[in-house]
Image (cartoon, grey):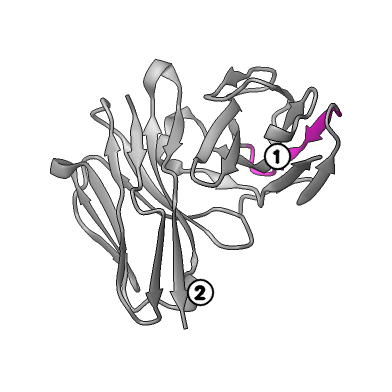
C-alpha cells in the first residue's frame, strides 16, 4: 500500500516561530500536495509540486513556503507562525498527471496549534 | 469556475436508517473525475470511489451506493442501513485541470453522525 507519512500528529508552536511540517511518501509518486482543513471551509490547497525542486501556489499560499529537494519528501514551512495558522494540515500524493483518475493518498494529518 | 458544493453541513441519523449525502459540482471540463473520501475521527482521508464523466452508471458496493447524474451535475452518496462506524466527515472532490494544473477541488464536507 502507498503510504504517506506526516512527521507529527500534534504540534504546539509559539507565535513568530519558524515551523516545518514534513511529509514523506514511499511509492514514487510525482505529485505532492499540502492542504489545510478548517471547520466549514473544507480542504484548501496551499502548495503543490509535480516534480523535484518545482512548486506551484495553491489557493492560500500566503504565509507559507514549501521545499521539495527529493521526490519522496515535501515540506511545508511556516516562516513566522501566527495564530490564524492554527489548523489541521493534510499532505497528499498522487501518481502523475497522466493518471489524473488515480486519486490522492493522504497522510494522517498534523494538527498545529499556534499560541 | 470549478466548484464542489456539499450543502449539508451535518446530518444525524439513527442506526439502520438510510442516508444520502449530496454533492453538486460545476466544471468546464468535458472530461473529469469525481471522488468521495471518508475522514473518520482518526483524521486520515480514505478513498471510497471515483467516477469519470463518461460513465453514468450507478455504483453499489455493499451498503454504499453512488448516483451520478450529469444532467443535474450531481454525484450523491447513499449509505443503506447506516452503522455507528459510518460516523465521519465525507468529502466530495472534482478534478481541476484549469491553467494546466492537475489537482482536485474539495467540497466543504458533510459530517455524518450515526446514533446507536
Query: Is residue A72 visible in this depiction of the protein?
Result: no
**Discs 2/1, front:** 1
The chain to which mark 2 is attached is: B
**In percent of the image, x 13 and y 42: which residue is there?**
B71
The answer for how far apart the CA atoms under marks 2 and 1 are is: 28 Å
Q: Nearer the viewer, residue A103 or A13?
A: A13
**In percent of the image, x 59 and y 27: which residue is there?**
A48
**In percent of the image, x 26 and y 25: which residue is there?**
B28
Q: Is residue A52 magenta?
A: no
Q: Quadrant of residue B80?
A: bottom left
- Evaluate whether label 2 is on the same chain as label 1: no
Give the secondary structure at mark 2.
Answer: helix
Q: Is residue B68 left or right of residue B9?
A: left
Q: Quadrant of residue A50?
A: top right
Q: Residues within 10 Å of mark 1 (few under 14, many from 20)?
A: some
Give the secondary structure at mark 1.
Answer: loop
Q: Nearer the viewer, residue A42 or A22?
A: A42
Q: Is residue B6 left or right of residue A90?
A: left
| Stretch of the chain drawn in magenta | A17-28
Q: Nearer the viewer, residue A72 or A47?
A: A47
Q: Which mark is residue B85?
A: 2
The chain to which mark 1 is attached is: A
Q: Quadrant of residue A77?
A: top right
Vertical position of residue A93 compared to residue A67: above or below: below
Q: Which mark is residue A53?
A: none
Which residue in the structure is indicated by mark 1?
A86
Query: Is residue B51 visible in this depiction of the protein?
Result: yes
Amino acid at each position: 500500500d502507498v503510504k504517506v507519512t506526516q512527521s507529527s500528529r500534534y504540534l504546539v508552536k509559539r507565535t513568530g516561530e519558524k515551523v516545518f511540517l514534513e511529509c514523506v511518501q514511499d511509492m514514487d509518486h510525482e505529485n505532492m500536495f499540502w492542504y489545510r482543513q478548517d471547520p466549514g471551509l473544507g480542504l484548501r490547497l496551499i502548495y503543490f509540486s509535480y516534480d523535484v525542486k518545482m512548486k506551484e501556489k495553491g489557493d492560500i499560499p500566503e504565509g507559507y513556503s514549501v521545499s521539495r529537494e527529493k521526490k519522496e519528501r515535501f515540506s511545508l514551512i511556516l516562516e513566522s507562525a501566527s495564530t490564524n495558522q492554527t489548523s489541521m494540515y493534510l499532505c497528499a500524493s498522487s501518481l502523475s498527471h497522466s493518471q489524473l483518475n488515480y486519486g490522492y493518498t493522504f497522510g494522517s494529518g498534523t494538527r498545529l496549534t499556534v499560541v | 469556475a470549478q466548484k464542489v458544493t456539499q450543502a449539508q453541513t451535518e446530518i444525524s441519523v439513527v442506526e439502520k436508517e438510510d442516508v444520502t449525502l449530496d454533492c453538486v459540482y460545476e466544471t468546464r471540463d468535458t472530461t473529469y473525475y469525481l471522488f468521495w473520501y471518508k475522514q473518520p475521527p482518526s483524521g486520515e482521508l480514505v478513498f471510497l470511489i471515483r467516477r469519470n464523466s463518461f460513465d453514468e452508471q450507478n455504483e453499489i458496493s455493499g451498503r454504499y451506493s453512488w448516483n451520478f447524474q450529469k444532467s443535474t451535475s450531481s454525484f450523491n452518496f447513499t449509505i443503506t442501513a447506516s452503522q455507528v462506524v459510518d460516523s465521519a466527515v465525507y468529502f466530495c472532490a472534482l478534478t481541476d485541470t484549469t491553467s494546466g494544473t492537475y489537482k482536485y477541488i474539495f467540497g466543504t464536507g458533510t459530517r455524518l453522525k450515526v446514533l446507536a
